[in-house]
């Protein structure tokens, strides 16, 4: 079985008694992208318990997305963009 973030969240839902089906959208929050125990990486949206979220991982994902968008219009990397601000 895969250990993608979506799969981990779907397993959490199943353990909580919430059925999920193949192809169904599963919402989750990244709680600790570098957790040693993979089950601690994400928290399914419908499972009780707010564990907070992994700020560093969301910043990394935002930078990656911004870099891809900016690179379509401007030929430089996000690192050079960050130094300008």
Image (tube, helix red, strand yellow):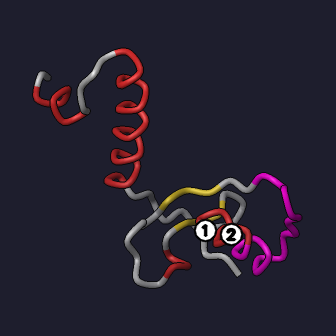
Q: Is residue 85 left or right of residue 28?
A: left
Circles 1 and 2: CB distance less than 8 Å? yes
Tell which residue pokes out farthest to the left in this image. Answer: 83
Regarding mark 2 in the picture, which secondary structure is present there?
A: helix
Q: Position of residue 66 (x, y in %)?
A: 38, 30
Query: In the rendered image, which quarter contains the C terminus?
Result: top left
- Magenta region includes residue 19: yes
Question: Residue 26 versus residue 23: which sits nearer the camera?
Answer: 23
Q: Position of residue 67 (x, y in %)?
A: 35, 32
Tell which residue pokes out farthest to the top in this image. Answer: 73
Quarter of the figure with residue 80: top left
Q: Could you say which disc has been placed on residue 4 in the image?
A: 1
Q: How many marks?
A: 2
Q: Residue at x 62, y 57 (%)?
A: 28
Q: Residue at x 77, y 76 (%)?
A: 16
Query: In the rendered image, which quarter contains the N terminus?
Result: bottom right
Question: Residue 72 versus residue 44: which sits nearer the camera?
Answer: 72
Magenta stretch prevailing secondary structure? loop
Q: Could you say which disc has been placed on residue 7 in the image?
A: 2
- Magenta region includes residue 78: no
Q: Residue at x 24, y 32 (%)?
A: 77
Residue 1 vs 9, above or below: the answer is below
Residue 83 vs 26, above or below: the answer is above
Tell me how far mark 1 sits from mark 2, CA to CA: 5 Å
Q: Residue at x 84, y 55 (%)?
A: 24
Q: Magenta stretch: give its range.
A: 11-25
Residue 47 vs 67, above or below: the answer is below
């Amino acid at each position: 079985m895969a250990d993608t973030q979506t799969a981990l969240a779907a397993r959490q839902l199943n353990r909580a008694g919430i059925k999920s089906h193949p192809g169904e959208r599963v919402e989750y929050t990244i709680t600790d992208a570098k957790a040693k125990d993979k089950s601690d990486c994400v928290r399914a949206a419908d499972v009780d318990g707010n564990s907070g979220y992994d700020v560093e991982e969301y910043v990394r994902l935002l930078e990656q997305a911004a870099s891809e968008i900016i690179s379509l219009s401007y030929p430089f990397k996000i690192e050079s963009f960050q130094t300008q601000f």
